[in-house]
Image: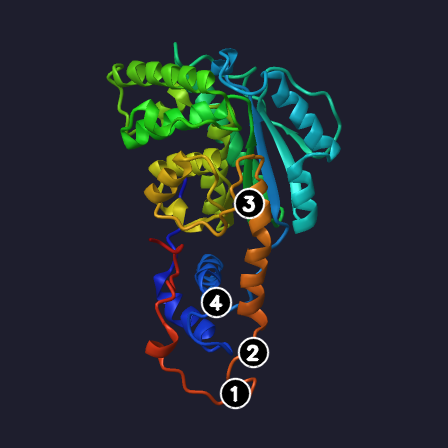
Amino acid sequence: MFSIPALNSGCLADIHQRIDNKTKPPGSLGQLEALASQIAQIQWQGEITELELNQPTMLVFAADHGIAAHDISIAPQAVTQQMVLNFIHGGAAINSFCRSSDMELRVVDAGMIAPIETDSPVLMKRRVGNGTRDFSKEPAMTQKEYQQALISGAALAQQLTLSGCNLLGFGEMGIGNTSSASALLALVKGNEAIHVVGRGTGISDEQLVLKQQLIAQALERVRGSGQNLNDAAVLLQEVGGFEIVQMVGAMLAAAEHRSVLLIDGFIVSVAALVASLINPRVVDYMVFAHRSAEGAHWDVLQLLEAEPLLDLGLRLGEGTGAALALPLLRVACDFYNNMASFESASVDVVIDDEDCGSDRGLAGEPVRD
């Protein structure tokens, strides 16, 4: 369904030569060099070209979750809609960070309990239903709902890329969605609930135990169903959320159009992990913005062999980490495009790679551990 082009490894020598000839010791810009190399490979058109980040747009996907009917969150489900209204009115952290990073913000109603009536261009209505079902007892969504959500997310990304956007940031909002992400991770990794379930935005000890119990119940139900647990569609239908499925579809479609995907924290990274089950090439287009304070996020990053750009102890979601990382991508593009070469700057220097430390993780792929 998603035909994602393989990155051309044949261009790496040219890209690395351009980076190494800048007026600096090889590898001295560390992870920024790998980042510039990755973006250059994504945007490669058969020759060395200027890197461009056009119309960077943050997509915050919002939906509600049936499992949130249990007391496992710091806030009631109504807060999903209240926070989306806050996004629309410009008052949330993601609004501040997008303004500071010069990034467009769009909020996608993938399936909140109730719709919001507004003409604001910030809100994009792509509703699949009034929230998912309680996956501790039954599948979160039907096959039809899954397909609708996947196609809707893909169509949204295609719409934005065809309008000129070549960088999409991914964020989320939905009370209970750390439970969905934790269950998805447990099914992919083969873990038990206690190893992947964290406190989310800060639940109590009693809520944490209940959350672990409910997810353990869901895992037992799904694992006992006899379904193919290597099938991303099965996992998403059973324990996913409408916003997570739409993110998966959007990531795959954006990569199909050779866009850079800026990945936020735990929940978005789990969506990225599930997207990689559908087409592994999608990971080559992903830049992982940060490592969140949610313990299981590190597990996801290791599974994806990803090295995040930032580690600020964030655990808010909304795409905040991704928005904070965007300036680093701009810097990587700027030095690649505009930093002088030794020749153009008339700098005559001989550098011994062994002395300056040439193990810089240069890659046409994301930096890997």
Mark 1 or mark 2: which comes first in sequence? 2
- Disc 1, disc 2: CB below 8 Å? yes
**Distance CA(mark 3)–CA(mark 4):** 21 Å
Q: Amino acid at mark 2?
A: Ala
Q: Which residue matches tag 4? A: 29
Q: Amino acid at mark 4?
A: Leu
Look at the numbered disc 2 and give the secondary structure of its residue.
loop
Q: Which residue matches tag 1? A: 347
Front-most of residues 76 and 323 = 76
Front-most of residues 85 and 320 = 320
| Residue 87, visible in the rendered structure | yes
Q: Amino acid at mark 1?
A: Val
Mark 1 or mark 3: which comes first in sequence? 3
- Disc 1, disc 3: CB below 8 Å? no
Residue 39: % across, % down: 48, 58
| Front label number (3 vs 4) | 4
Say if 110 sits above or below 96 in the image: above
**Distance CA(mark 1)–CA(mark 3):** 37 Å
Which residue is located at x 35 percent, y 66 percent? 10
Q: Which residue matches tag 2? A: 340
Q: Is residue 131 left or right of residue 83?
A: left
Mark 3 or mark 4: which comes first in sequence? 4
Which residue is located at x 36 percent, y 29 percent? 196
Look at the numbered disc 1 and give the secondary structure of its residue.
loop
Look at the numbered disc 3 and give the secondary structure of its residue.
helix
**Distance CA(mark 4)–CA(mark 1):** 18 Å
Q: Which residue matches tag 3? A: 322
> Mark 4 Cα within 10 Å, few/some/many (few <14, many 20+)?
some
- Residue at the front extreme, as displayed: 205
**Distance CA(mark 2)–CA(mark 3):** 29 Å
Disc marking residue 133:
none
Mark 2 or mark 3: which comes first in sequence? 3
